[in-house]
């Protein structure tokens, strides 16, 4: 897609955290946006700011249903495939459903996109694909063995995308997301991501539990960096950039202890009592990768990726949003 042109974009999982942010962004750029979601993990309130936009269309459906996929991609130029069942613990507790959504659903979308002659299929891959690979930073072509059913499903996505590129000519780009956080991320539920969960607990003066000793580290990635990567993947005209996968991260790592320290510091601006909330250490979580740090050299070289938000900058923005929307 050439910059400045208007297109019709399907965003699967568009009512979810990342998907709804992508919907909002591409609508703001004047594109037509379709959202396919079954609301298993997405929320209608994530769509409230643009549900009445004439360029927006909500399709309630399930990627596990091939007919729903076929209907959603009709006359679509590009697909941003975000729909998935996330969470390593969820996949350990229910590997069958995770596989049905993340593998069978993904394959349905690839087939439907190929049949509809979609110009490019950009999909959410995952840093969990690196598995037990111990080298840092993580480089795209060096991965280890998966450590969870979720990680297996996301690696299978990459394999299927490569086959569809080679066999059927579908342009694909996979974005290996690293611990994405930001506005609209759900703080509730058994599988809530760590940042919104900790923010809510701190705002409620509830003790927070860190898995392990807090020295596991992550490349926390603010949502606006992810939006930038999706737009670059959508608009690149570099033939060498297509049919590949890219780390989508900031390229820095912080420990969980660092994270909690920043959260307390930034939240005390709103409520000084948060500085005194107790922090408890629990057991390490099964399937977790100890350390995660992305090399973003490939994305910089081939896509001109230039992330603007560090963990600290992103947290300040995210905390402001949580305080004003969830308090």
Image (cartoon, helix red, strand yellow):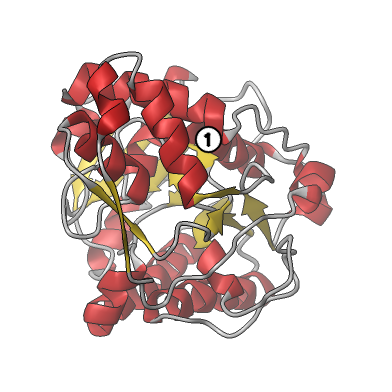
- Residue 248 or 25: which is nearer the viewer? 248
Is 46 on the left or on the right of 133, as rendered?
Answer: left
Query: Residue beneath label 1, please?
Result: 227
146 versus 310 height, above or below: below
64 versus 225 height, above or below: below
Where is residue 54 drawn, in percent x and y?
27, 20
Residue at the spot x=68%, y=31% of the render?
2
160 versus 186 height, above or below: below
> Hey, which quadrant is residue 24 in on the image?
top left
Is 86 on the left or on the right of 206, as rendered?
Answer: right
Where is residue 314 drawn, in percent x and y?
50, 29
> Hey, which quadrant is residue 44 in on the image?
top left
Residue at the spot x=67%, y=45% of the render?
252
Please say whether residue 305 is visible from this viewpoint. Answer: yes
- Residue 45 or 178: which is nearer the viewer? 178
Where is residue 40 drawn, in percent x and y?
16, 57
Residue at the spot x=63%, y=21% of the render?
4
**10 Å neighbourhood of mark 1: few (<14), some, or many (≥20)?**
many
Please say whether residue 77 is visible from this viewpoint. Answer: no
Is 148 on the left or on the right of 139, as rendered?
Answer: left
Label 1 element class: helix
> Hey, which quadrant is residue 313 in on the image?
top right
Where is residue 288 drawn, in percent x and y?
45, 71
Figure disc tally: 1
Q: Quadrant of the N terminus?
A: top right
Residue at the spot x=74%, y=47% of the render?
299
- Residue 77 or 310: which is nearer the viewer? 310
Q: Quadrant of the C terminus?
A: top left
- Residue 40 or 136: which is nearer the viewer? 136
């Amino acid at each position: 897609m050439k910059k400045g042109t208007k297109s019709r974009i399907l965003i699967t999982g568009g009512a979810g955290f990342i998907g709804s942010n992508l919907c909002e962004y591409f609508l703001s750029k004047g594109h037509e946006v379709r959202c396919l979601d079954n609301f298993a993990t997405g929320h209608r309130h994530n769509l409230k700011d643009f549900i009445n936009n004439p360029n927006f269309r909500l399709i309630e459906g399930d990627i596990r249903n091939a007919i729903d996929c076929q209907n959603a991609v009709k006359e679509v130029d590009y697909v941003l495939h975000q729909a998935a069942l996330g969470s390593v613990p969820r996949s350990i507790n229910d590997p069958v459903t995770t596989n049905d959504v993340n593998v069978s659903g993904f394959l349905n979308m690839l087939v439907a996109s190929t049949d509809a002659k979609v110009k490019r299929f950009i999909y959410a891959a995952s840093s969990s694909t690196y598995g037990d690979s111990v080298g840092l930073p993580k480089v795209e072509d060096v991965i280890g063995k998966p450590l969870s059913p979720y990680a297996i499903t996301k690696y299978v996505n990459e394999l299927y995308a490569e086959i569809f590129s080679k066999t059927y000519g579908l342009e694909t780009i996979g974005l290996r997301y690293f611990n994405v956080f930001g506005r609209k991320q759900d703080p509730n539920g058994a599988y809530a991501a760590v940042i919104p969960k900790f923010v809510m607990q701190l705002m409620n003066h509830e003790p927070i539990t860190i898995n392990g000793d807090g020295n596991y580290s992550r490349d926390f990635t603010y949502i606006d960096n992810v939006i930038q990567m999706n737009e670059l993947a959508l608009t690149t005209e570099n033939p060498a950039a297509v049919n590949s996968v890219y780390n989508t991260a900031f390229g820095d790592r912080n420990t969980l202890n660092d994270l909690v320290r920043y959260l307390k510091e930034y939240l005390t601006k709103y409520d000084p009592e948060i500085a005194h909330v107790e922090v408890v250490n629990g057991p390490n979580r099964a399937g977790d990768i100890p350390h995660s740090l992305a090399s973003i050299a490939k994305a910089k070289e081939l896509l001109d990726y230039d992330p603007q938000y560090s963990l600290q900058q992103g947290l300040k923005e995210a905390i402001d949003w949580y305080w004003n929307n969830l308090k």
